Image (tube, rainbow, N blue to C red):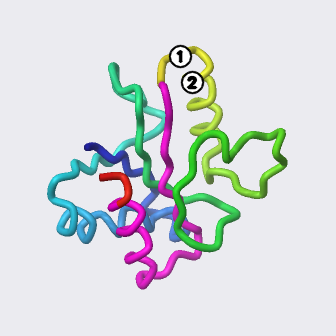
Amino acid sequence: MKIYVFGNPLVKEDSFPLRLLIDLENSFRQIKFVVADPNENFPPDGERNLIILDTVIGIKKPMLLNLNDFDSKKNTPVSPHDYDLLFHLLILKKLNKIMGVKIIGIPPDFKKEDLDSVSKIISTLL
């Protein structure tokens, strides 16, 4: 299994996925965590079912989301911090380039003690 990790180390609210990386790698040695830039040839060719760890604005606790959770018709309060990523993923899905996306969303005000919640979410994906 592969989980793509997004974040900006220079922006506190967007750096939590990257700061969790060492703990997650130690807890889940069977998972390959890949730090990726969503604006740089993402996803790699042949990747059709994606799992992403990223900051999501509008959530209060870590949660597992999919693209349907961001459907504008639902008028949902959640949105990925990087609208370009969501738009890109929605286009890829519409073009049948990807089959699905699971997003392990972390709130921008993430606390280190929420790491257990993230670990539980990842465990459900194994």
What SS does tag 1 mark?
A: loop
Q: Residues within 10 Å of mark 2 (few under 14, many from 20)?
A: some
Residue that badge 2 annotates? 93
Task: Say what amino acid the circle numbered 1 marks.
Answer: Asn
Residue under the point 34% across and 20% down: 45
Residue 56 colored magenta?
no
| Residue 14 in the image, given as x and y percentages of width and height | 52, 62
| Residue 91 in the image, given as x and y percentages of width and height | 62, 23
Disc 2 to disc 1, C-alpha distance = 5 Å
Residue under the point 28% across and 46% down: 34
Foreground residue, 120 or 70? 120
Determine contact: label 2, label 1, CB under 8 Å. Answer: yes
Residue span colored magenta: 99-123
Residue that badge 1 annotates? 96
Residue pushed farthest bottom?
113
Task: Say what amino acid the circle numbered 2 marks.
Answer: Lys
* Image-based side of 48 in relation to 64, left or right: left
Residue under the point 78% across and 57% down: 77
* Image-based side of 43 in relation to 31, left or right: right
| Residue 16 in the image, given as x and y percentages of width and height | 44, 68
Numbered circles on residues, count: 2
What numbered label is drawn on residue 79?
none
